[in-house]
Image: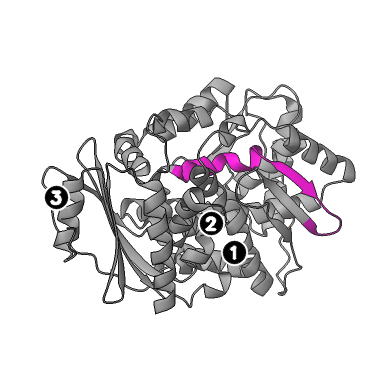
């Protein structure tokens, strides 16, 4: 479900509110959504790491479009990112300064690259009852990007893109840039951007969401550590600026988009913190290599104790054609996918208990240019887990699917089948192909 929400996570740390406690207890910046704010107590690493050589501030004297004060701040932030993350830049990071208009254009262009896929996804989300019928998905996302962005890492070019500044960077802007600099740093070491793109190209979308949680959780933990080093005055500025941020566009989007947006940050932070507790940054570094081949899943991010152990069950999905429809996608819906859709339709926090026993799944998504059709085949870890999701999906179908559309929830030989279609005849064809009577 998160294919076109990938780039949205660039906004999360600049769009929320932050509360800070004493000592090492820090509530990270977040937005007011159905997900609770994430409170993180960052422990000392359990390992002894080799001290890093004193980093030399880079020379950004040739960087145009910013004041000398901002240039000095950027130089210091590059060193701070290396220090807090315990890794050096292999090559100096590329800082690109653009106007506010150019920044917004670059962000919007990154969405519009996949514009041909938006009609199919919009139709599917409306079939699922997650988007109102009159909503235009592309316009909704582009409006969301009208919110202020303090800067972002462009993995395709390796640039840290920042807006031009005449005055010095605020504390919140500095924190955001530490976050993005850590992305650039870890991408140099682990080449996560190319691996992530490959997951998307191969339609391994649940794995991609889990990997994104590692990437964002890593940079968020680094920012937490940076924030903990602020003076009381700076911390007050950080909190105050966060509270004043305009989040109206974010608050206007459906909960499933908000939850998908925040997942890599709040749940990803919990996941990375668990790794950090076990073996410091070394465990986080190792995850970049291990996760793409486990295979991993959002289940393992939601429950870090499952990481590397509770691997997805193999699920075979029947292959067949629907006349007049194109098969848009075959992928894995994942535990997080079930959670966000059920929470929006049936009520906050109901998706977790229903999807907690996720064992594995596979889905087909079809589109004929106007109408959507969906088939999900699901396996639970136990028979009881399957029954719990079955009960939730029956209630979901009754609440979310329009009377003129088709919906079916059925169980056969230890597998749960969920069929939705805008056209009743198409839904009946899918169901009958699976061996279920619709009469």
The front one of 383 and 81 is 383
Q: Which residue is mark 3?
A: 322
Q: Position of residue 330 (x, y in %)?
A: 27, 56
Q: Position of residue 249 (x, y in %)?
A: 57, 31
Q: Which residue is mark 1?
A: 271
Is residue 338 visible to us here?
Answer: yes
Marks 1 and 2, Cα distance to the nearest angstrom? 8 Å
In the rendered structure, which disc, 1 or 3, sits on the residue that comes first in sequence? Answer: 1
Q: Tell me whether the residue at label 2 lies in contact with that at label 3, contact meaning CB atoms closer than 8 angstroms.
A: no
Q: Residues within 10 Å of mark 1 (few under 14, many from 20)?
A: many
Residue at 63 percent across and 22 percent down: it is 65
Is 250 placed above or below 279 here? above
Q: Residue furthest left?
A: 323
Q: Residues within 10 Å of mark 3 (few under 14, many from 20)?
A: some
Q: Position of residue 168 (x, y in %)?
A: 76, 28
Residue 18 counted in the magenta span = yes
Q: Tell me whether the residue at label 1 lies in contact with that at label 2, contact meaning CB atoms closer than 8 angstroms.
A: yes
Please give left or right for residue 391 compared with residue 273 in the image: left
Asked where in the image residue 268 lies, by quadrant, the reply is bottom right
The magenta span reads 5-25
Q: Which residue is mark 2?
A: 213
Q: Work out which quarter of the rendered image holds the C terminus and state it.
A: bottom left
């Amino acid at each position: 479900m998160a294919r076109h929400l990938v780039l949205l996570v660039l906004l999360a740390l600049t769009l929320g509110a932050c509360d800070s406690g004493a000592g090492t207890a820090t509530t990270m910046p977040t937005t007011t959504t159905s997900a609770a704010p994430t409170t993180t107590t960052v422990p000392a690493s359990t390992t002894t790491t080799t001290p890093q050589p004193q980093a030399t501030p880079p020379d950004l004297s040739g960087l145009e479009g910013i004041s000398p004060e901002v240039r000095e701040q950027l130089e210091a932030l590059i060193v701070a990112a290396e220090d807090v993350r315990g890794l050096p830049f292999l090559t100096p990071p590329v800082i690109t300064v653009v106007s506010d208009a150019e920044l917004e254009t670059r962000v919007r262009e990154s969405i519009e690259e996949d514009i041909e896929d938006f009609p199919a996804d919009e139709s599917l989300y409306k079939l699922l009852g997650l988007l109102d019928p009159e909503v235009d998905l592309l316009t909704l996302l582009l409006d969301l990007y009208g919110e202020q962005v303090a800067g972002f890492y462009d993995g395709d070019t390796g640039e840290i893109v920042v807006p031009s500044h005449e005055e010095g960077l605020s504390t919140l802007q500095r924190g955001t840039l530490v976050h993005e600099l850590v992305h650039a740093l870890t991408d140099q070491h682990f080449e996560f951007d190319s691996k992530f793109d490959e997951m998307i190209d191969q339609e391994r979308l649940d794995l991609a969401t889990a990997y994104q949680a590692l990437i964002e959780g890593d940079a968020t933990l680094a920012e937490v550590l940076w924030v903990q080093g602020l003076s009381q005055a700076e911390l007050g500025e950080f909190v105050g600026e966060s509270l004043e941020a305009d989040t109206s566009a974010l608050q206007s989007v459906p909960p499933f988009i908000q939850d998908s947006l925040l997942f890599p940050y709040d749940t990803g932070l919990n996941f990375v913190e668990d790794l950090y507790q076990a073996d410091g940054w070394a465990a986080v570094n190792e995850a970049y290599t291990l996760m793409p081949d486990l295979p991993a899943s959002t289940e393992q991010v939601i429950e870090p104790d499952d990481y590397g152990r509770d691997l997805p069950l193999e699920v075979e999905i029947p292959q067949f054609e629907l006349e007049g429809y194109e098969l848009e996608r075959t992928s894995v819906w994942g535990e997080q996918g079930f959670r966000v859709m059920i929470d929006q339709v049936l009520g906050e926090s109901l998706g977790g208990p229903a999807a907690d026993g996720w064992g594995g799944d596979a889905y087909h998504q079809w589109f004929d240019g106007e109408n959507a059709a969906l088939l999900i085949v699901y396996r639970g870890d136990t028979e009881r887990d399957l029954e719990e999701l079955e009960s939730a999906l029956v209630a979901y179908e009754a609440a979310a699917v329009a009377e003129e559309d088709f919906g079916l929830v059925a169980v056969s030989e230890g597998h749960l089948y969920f069929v939705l279609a805008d056209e009743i005849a198409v839904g009946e064809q899918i169901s009958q192909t699976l061996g279920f009577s619709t009469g």
